[in-house]
Amino acid sequence: GHVAGSACGKNIGTSSFSTIGEERRSNYAMRIEDEEEFIAAVTTDLPYIPGYFFVDAKLNKSGASPVARVVSASLSPLSTDVFTDMHNAGAIVLDTRDPMDFAAGFIPGAMNIGLNGDFAVWAGTLIAPTDRILLVCEPGKETEAVQRLARIGYERVQGYLNGGMQAWFAANERYDKILTLRGDECAQLTDNEGYKLLDVRNRRETAKQRITGSLHIPLSLLKDRIDNLQRDGKWLIYCAGGYRSMIAASLLKAAGFHFVASVEGGIKEVAKLSPQLV
């Protein structure tokens, strides 16, 4: 699991193997001769450690439940009425659909963490292992969602919305939406509509490129710092490609923020279509 992008280390490379000679040539840390400088370099700006890492360390020692048993117990199809009652009783709604599908219509209060991205990492960062979870999935994706949660020690999935969001719409239940913008539409909202920019990427990313005037709060810290944001303000959220910004937008919506938008395609599209903003 220690691959590029993993939270298990800093600047992990993309190669599946290497040699000492190659590392001496290309690895920044191998070129540092002073011990104190080396320690400072490799321990500075480390990735945020998801909370489930520590829970899993204990679970691995005590012994986890068999995945098959967890999956079997979690795959309970729930009607819209039962789903709503369980949500009202405190269970978290985790919507695992594609961010753009989520934005077009979702259950109020739901958190979006799509299966098409770093699903387990962000679920383990933003949801506590003790939380009761209700799933909204594309029909046929329920088992995958439960399995990926079980692999990080999350065993409290109560069930899934039978029929997915189509069943919710068919039952005429209330739903919410999130505005999404292309990269060339951002200036209109910030200049004319009073939206403030919120960058939810990590610090290494923002050091390379960011939109002028944006506020930076990494997604991993957003839940803890959400009260620092103006709840009646207007927020246009961006990340690298749109996956994390939709997670952030769903968190703000669930916390009672009304004016929330996400940049489709992230800063990459902004730089391409509105280079004056970067």
Image: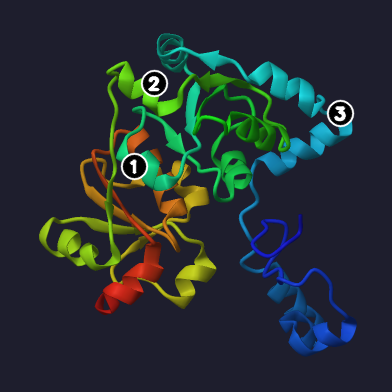
- Residue 225: give x, y in percent of width and height: 42, 46
Res 278 visible? no
**Neighbour class for label 3 at 10 Å: few (<14), some, many (≥20)?**
few
- Residue 222: give x, y in percent of width and height: 45, 47
Residue 225: mark in rendering: none
- Residue 6: give x, y in percent of width and height: 67, 58
Gap between marks 3 and 2 measured at Cα: 38 Å
Which element type, helix, strand or loop, lies under badge 1? helix
Three-letter amino acid code of the residue under disc 2: Ala
Query: Residue pushed farthest left?
Result: 192
Q: Is residue 165 above or below residue 44?
A: above
Q: Nearer the viewer, residue 43 or 138?
A: 138
Instruction: Classify the position of the N terminus by image quarter.
Output: bottom right
Q: Nearer the viewer, mark 3 or mark 2?
A: 2
Three-letter amino acid code of the residue under disc 3: Gly
Q: Would you identify the image quadrant in which residue 169 lies?
A: top left
- Residue 215: give x, y in percent of width and height: 34, 61
Residue linked to disc 2: 167
Which element type, helix, strand or loop, lies under badge 2? helix
Residue linked to disc 3: 63
The residue at the point 40 percent across, 9 percent down is 81
Residue linked to disc 1: 103
The residue at the point 52 percent across, 50 percent down is 220
Among the two numbered marks 3 and 2 on one chain, the one whose residue lies closer to the N terminus: 3
Three-letter amino acid code of the residue under disc 1: Ala
Q: Is residue 140 left or right of residue 247?
A: right
Q: Is residue 266 left or right of residue 130?
A: left
